[in-house]
Image (tube, grey):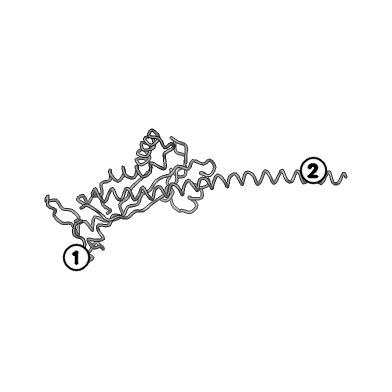
Amino acid sequence: MRQSHASRRAQSGQSLVEFCIVVPAFLFLILVTFQLVLIYRAKTTLDYAAFQAARAGSISGVDRSKMQSSLAFGLTPLLATSPDVAGVARARAKAELETRLFASIDVIAPTRAAFNEHRERQYDGRYALPNDSLAFRDNRVGSSGVSVQDANLLKIKVTYKLPLIVPFADRVIAGFSSLLTEGESYRPASMLIEEPVSGHRRLPIESYAVVRMQTPIYDSNRLAR
């Protein structure tokens, strides 16, 4: 009986040790999974927002301000906390601020070289990358490496620094991301240190979008070098 009682006490102590090891690890796994789900949700929303920004650029001659406004509009559902009008208005205002501070839009194509090669004088006397009658234009590739048809494809890259809001998981994801990259140019400081306003680390996520231009491009300074 004494041996049986001692054996039960030993098993009880062993179970307590196993509980202290397994439960924190399980809770931490849940936190990481929850943060990864939020990252996936943000990436899906950013893909839609990037398409909205590219579409705005295609109908405005690659106007950066209109592209940024459309990007903020696309990110609004990500920041909404209530479905009422006031909640949507707050989310829209927050999206505008987030876009200005933590998002960037880079035009990958067309390039200025393509603009200079294929530009034509328009009815108002200004030079522009033409957008009309593309099916009937010469499709030969020139020194810029693209034809006039391909020069009318707008490709952008959108980068958004997503706040990691789940405790403990943010440190692991940010640290793991830094291990996968090399060099300071690939490790933004905002991803590795806490943001002074919200206190959250931020992880840059990227999305690409390609649409065909619907209007001529007049300003080559809006294009990629």
Left or right, residue 37 beside residue 20: left
Dot 2 falls on a residue whose secondary structure is: helix
Residue under label 1, please give it: 138
Q: CA distance from mark 2 to mark 1?
A: 88 Å
Q: Amino acid at mark 1?
A: Asp
* Quadrant housing residue 210: bottom left
Instruction: Pinpoint residue 37: horizontal percent, then vertical percent.
Output: 49, 48
**Looking at this rendering, what residue extends furthest in the front direction?**
84
Instruction: Pinpoint residue 32: horizontal percent, then vertical percent.
Output: 54, 46
Q: Amino acid at mark 2?
A: Arg
Q: From the image, which quarter does the N terminus lie in?
A: top right
| Disc 2 crowd, CA 10 A, few/some/many (<14, 14-19, 20+) | few
Q: From the image, which quarter does the C terminus lie in?
A: bottom left
Instruction: Pinpoint residue 71: horizontal percent, then vertical percent.
Output: 34, 45
Dot 1 falls on a residue whose secondary structure is: loop
The residue positioned 45% from the left and 46% from the top of the image is 203
Instruction: Pinpoint residue 93: horizontal percent, then vertical percent.
Output: 36, 36
Q: Which mark is residue 9?
A: 2
Q: Of 179 and 17, which appears nearest the observer? A: 17
Q: Of 8 and 196, which appears nearest the observer? A: 8
The residue positioned 14% from the left and 51% from the top of the image is 126
**Looking at this rendering, what residue extends furthest in the bottom direction?**
140
Left or right, residue 59 beside residue 81: left
| Disc 1 crowd, CA 10 A, few/some/many (<14, 14-19, 20+) | few
Dot placed on the residue nearer the N-terminal end, 2 or 1: 2
Q: Which mark is residue 58?
A: none
